[in-house]
Amino acid sequence: MIVTDPIADFLTRIRNAQQAGHRVVDIPSSNEKKAITEILYENGYILKYKFDDEAGKNGVIKIALKYDPVSKRPIIRELKRISRPGLRQYRKASELPRVINGLGIAVISTSKGIMTDKKAREENVGGEVLCFII
């Protein structure tokens, strides 16, 4: 199966696993997806992750999803793809979006790697707005 938009596939797999109440989700690996996974972990959206380079052609990312202990709802409320193959969204450092006034994060692909909107502002670099995580 050929996926034309791997980032959208990555976000959809996480969204579907959460709706189904799964604890762990397996996603085909790529360097871009690994960077986004690390951002999710650093910002407290997932419990833990493991890059399994043995499985399959490119390897697999195993993500342990995080749920609220009281309400049992997923910590990630919304994953929204912004820039897509048909319509790329590029922003200058001064025009980077703020997600719910800083409560969510925007993942930006910059010349210095994939990072959050906050870090991109600190480093004063713009780039492609990949997705919003709330």
Image (spheres, rainbow, N blue to C red):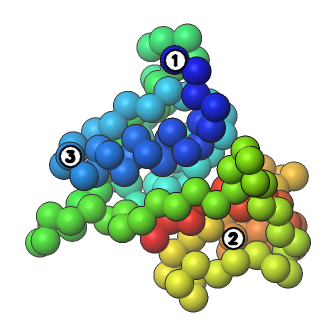
| Among numbered discs 3 and 2, the one appearing first in the sequence | 3
Q: Which residue is mark 1?
A: 1
| Among numbered discs 2 and 1, the one appearing first in the sequence | 1
Q: Is residue 98 something one can see in this rendering?
A: yes
| Tag 2 near tag 1, CB within 8 Å | no
Q: Is residue 122 left or right of residue 82?
A: right
Q: Which residue is mark 2?
A: 117
Disc 3 marks which amino acid? Ala
Where does residue 94 sit, x and y in percent of width and height? 85, 81
Where does residue 17 sit, x and y in percent of width and height? 29, 44
The residue at the far front in this view is: 86
The residue at the far left in this view is: 70
Disc 2 marks which amino acid? Asp
- Asked if residue 34 is positioned above or below residue 15 in the image, the reply reads above
Within 10 Å of the Cα at label 2, are there few (<14), some (14-19), or many (20+) other Cα atoms? many
**Cα distance, mark 3 to mark 2?**
30 Å
Q: Which mark is residue 20?
A: 3
- Asked if residue 74 is positioned above or below residue 54 in the image, the reply reads below
Where does residue 53 sit, x and y in percent of width and height? 52, 19
What residue is at 85 percent from the left and 74 percent from the top?
93
